[in-house]
Image: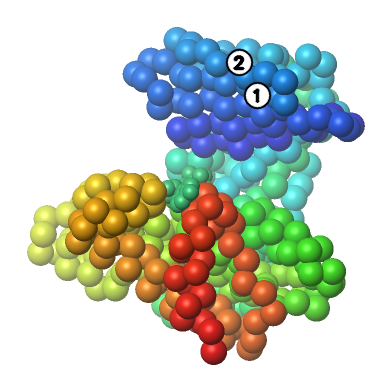
Amino acid sequence: MRILVLNAGSSSLKTALFTDNAQQTGLIDWTYQAGHAHVSLQSDAEENVAVVAVTSRGDVIRSHLQALCQQAPDGVGHRIVHGGMDYCDSVRITAAVKAAIVRNAAFAPVHHPAHLEAIAAVEDVFGQELPQVAVFDTAFHARMPAAAAAYPIPYHLYGEGVRRYGFHGTSHRYVAEQAAAFLGQSLAALRLVTCHLGNGCSLAAIAQGYSIDTTMGFTPLAGLMMGTRSGDVDPGLLLFLLRERGHTGESLDRLLNRESGLLGISGISNDLRQILAAAAAGNQRAQLAYDMFIHRLRSHIGAMVASLGGLDALIFTAGIGENSSKVRADTCAALGF
Ligand code: ADP
């Protein structure tokens, strides 16, 4: 089997080709330089890197797919951010599924146009008949009980799709399955909290193999403090900023999504490695950013454990979770009881 996997975002397209005995990965970084993309292809044997002029993103994606796949794959999987109320499992992409991805772009305006662009490029290169599958980031959380999914706002909004969806679902699901395999136990019998700590951060409380609670909500802005995203703030604070400080929807979006989190507090970086280095050198704002990150992580883990009624394993993944033993140790230090 030859399976091509695409993770298309506004700033990058990540690709991987899995064959029976090998794996090749690729990356198009759209942010490299104005009018130019940085394209790389990596296999066990070699890495090819090129900077290409971008007149059409579609052209760049098509030639990247041709370079990655010497022969057509048997199937293609796309990571799609939002299944909305339409999908709670992976689905073969048809005209109706594409229409739903367009419709749900209101929930994920940055990602969905990039997903559609990637689906179209695959059709162009390999033909309409090649099976393509949408794998939704929200799907793993779709079985959250209503008590966890609904917001305490007027009920009719819940029926209109204003509810908690949760994200990073493919990551939470994968590491939960891997943890069960490591422990030699059935996933269905375990109560797990999975911590996806990258630039974006979220937790999932997993029971009987599904997410029953999570820290992200209607959007990926909720929950933990992140690289540039605030995570939870008092919603009244947003009203104050709108009414009293001249903010607009656009400027609040920028403030909360791009200028907050580790970057907003430290004033140094959204990258935890730089925060840790600055804190070690005595920078107090970097130290505060780190302390807040850990404080919020601990308290949200506490909430997830309470949703589960106990805990069998705590799992860390993504750039920070995998690599920072300090974050893991400082988090767990509060959970010894
Ligand atoms: P993305 O969400 O963009 O995919 P990643 O999962 O790659 O992000 O995670 C990026 C984060 O991981 C950054 O904050 C980076 O500083 C952090 N990180 C990577 N390696 C380390 C490390 N050795 N120690 C601490 N943090 C690390």
State whether residue 154 appears in this view. no
What is the CA distance from the residue labelled 1 to the residue labelled 2?
6 Å
Residue 272 is situated, as x and y percent measured from the top left of the image, at: 38, 52
Q: Amino acid at mark 1?
A: Gln
Examine the rendered structure and indicate whether residue 130 appears above or below residue 319: above
Q: Position of residue 268 (x, y in %)?
A: 24, 47
- Drawn side of residue 213 relative to residue 129, left or right: left
* Residue plotted at (48% across, 20% down): 38
Q: Is mark 1 within 8 Å of ligand 1?
A: no
- Give the percent coordinates (x, y) of residue 308: 63, 83
Number of numbered discs on residues: 2
Q: Which secondary structure, mark 1?
A: strand
Q: Dot 2, crowdedness within 10 Å: few (<14), some or many (≥20)?
A: few
Label ID, residue 57: none
Q: Which residue is mark 1?
A: 42
Vertical position of residue 295 compared to residue 201: above or below:
below
What is the quadrant of the C terminus in the image?
A: bottom right
Q: What residue is drawn where x is 53% and y is 52%?
A: 323
Q: Are marks 1 and 2 in contact (CB under 8 Å)?
A: yes
Q: Is residue 277 visible?
A: yes
Looking at the image, residue 10 lies above or below residue 172: above
**Callout 2: CB less than 8 Å from ligand 1:** no
Picture residue at 71% right of the left edge, 35% below the top: 5
Amino acid type at mark 2: Asn
Find disc 2 in the rendering and name its residue: 48
Q: Is tag 1's residue or tag 2's residue first in the polypeptide sequence?
A: 1
Q: Is residue 288 left or right of residue 226?
A: left
Asked which secondary structure carries label 2, the reply is strand
